[in-house]
């Protein structure tokens, strides 16, 4: 907490008045980040307009936009903590639920006749690709991420097209 206070310029006592513990701070940071990242207003507008291109662009952005170095490292730290810290695991479950709800809205708009199981599989595919790209960027910074991004985006478009059929 002393490090957080020093970095933020806020007194330790004030931090404890605002947050119960470190997990509450992490939760607040993640809530802010997930709100920005999901940009649910843009998705809702695209769904309301039935703008297929905008919905696909939103899905691709969620799946493949490269987080900056600090965000990638935070994501990797959180992933490690999910297995050790029940409070972080609970926070992650809420984020996962919110992400899946938004992806479900997007996929249902594109393919209203697709089964829930098929949509769930495509959601898992998107989430797995997203986490995989985060890990690759951290573990292999010299790799050709752009070529892989293009290939994965092509696979994603194929999956969505198959879902729509």
Image (spheres, grey):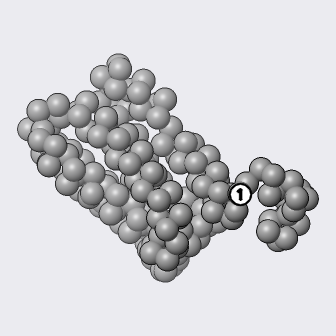
Whether residue 118 is situated above or below residue 21 in the rendered picture: above
Quadrant of the image occupied by residue 56:
top left
Residue 110 in percent (x, y) is at 23, 33
Q: In the rendered image, which quarter contains the N terminus? A: bottom right
The residue that label 1 is drawn on is: 20
Near-viewer residue (117 or 150): 117
The structure residue drawn at horizontal position 41% and vertical position 27%, both measured from the top left corner, is 44
Picture coordinates of residue 79 (x, y %)? Answer: 48, 70
Judged from the image, the secondary structure of the residue bearing numbered disc 1 is loop
Residue at 17% over, 31% down: 112
Q: Describe residue 148's horizontal placement relative to residue 16 as left or right.
A: left
Pick the front one: 48 or 2: 2
Instruction: Answer yes or no: is residue 129 visible.
Output: yes
Residue with the most extreme top position:
49
Residue at screen point 81% across, 52% down: 17
Pick out the residue farthest to the left.
165
Q: Position of residue 10 (x, y in %)?
A: 89, 56
**Direction from residue 21 to residue 105 in the image, left or right:** left
In this rendering, the answer to whether 146 lies above or below 52 is below
Taking the image as drawn, is residue 76 in sight?
Answer: no
Is residue 110 depicted above or below 82 in this figure?
above
Q: Residues within 10 Å of mark 1 (few under 14, many from 20)?
A: few
Q: Quadrant of the C terminus?
A: top left
Q: Is residue 127 above or below residue 52?
A: below
Please name the residue shown 27% across and 51% down the image. 123
Residue 108, position as x, y percentages in the image: 23, 34
**Front-most of residues 153 and 115:** 115
Label count reads: 1
157 sits left or right of 47 in the view: left
């Amino acid at each position: 907490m002393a490090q957080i206070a020093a970095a933020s310029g806020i007194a330790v006592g004030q931090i404890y008045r605002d947050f119960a513990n470190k997990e509450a701070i992490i939760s607040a940071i993640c809530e802010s980040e997930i709100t920005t990242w999901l940009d649910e207003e843009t998705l809702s507008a695209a769904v309301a307009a039935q703008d297929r291109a905008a919905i696909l662009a939103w899905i691709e952005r969620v799946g493949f936009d490269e987080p900056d170095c600090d965000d990638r490292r935070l994501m990797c730290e959180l992933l490690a903590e999910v297995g050790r810290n029940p409070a972080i695991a609970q926070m992650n479950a809420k984020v996962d639920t919110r992400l899946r709800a938004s992806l479900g809205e997007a996929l249902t708009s594109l393919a209203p006749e697709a089964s829930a199981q098929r949509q769930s599989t495509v959601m898992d595919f998107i989430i797995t690709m997203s986490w995989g790209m985060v890990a690759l960027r951290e573990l292999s910074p010299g790799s050709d991420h752009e070529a892989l991004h293009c290939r994965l985006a092509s696979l994603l478009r194929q999956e969505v097209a198959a879902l729509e059929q």
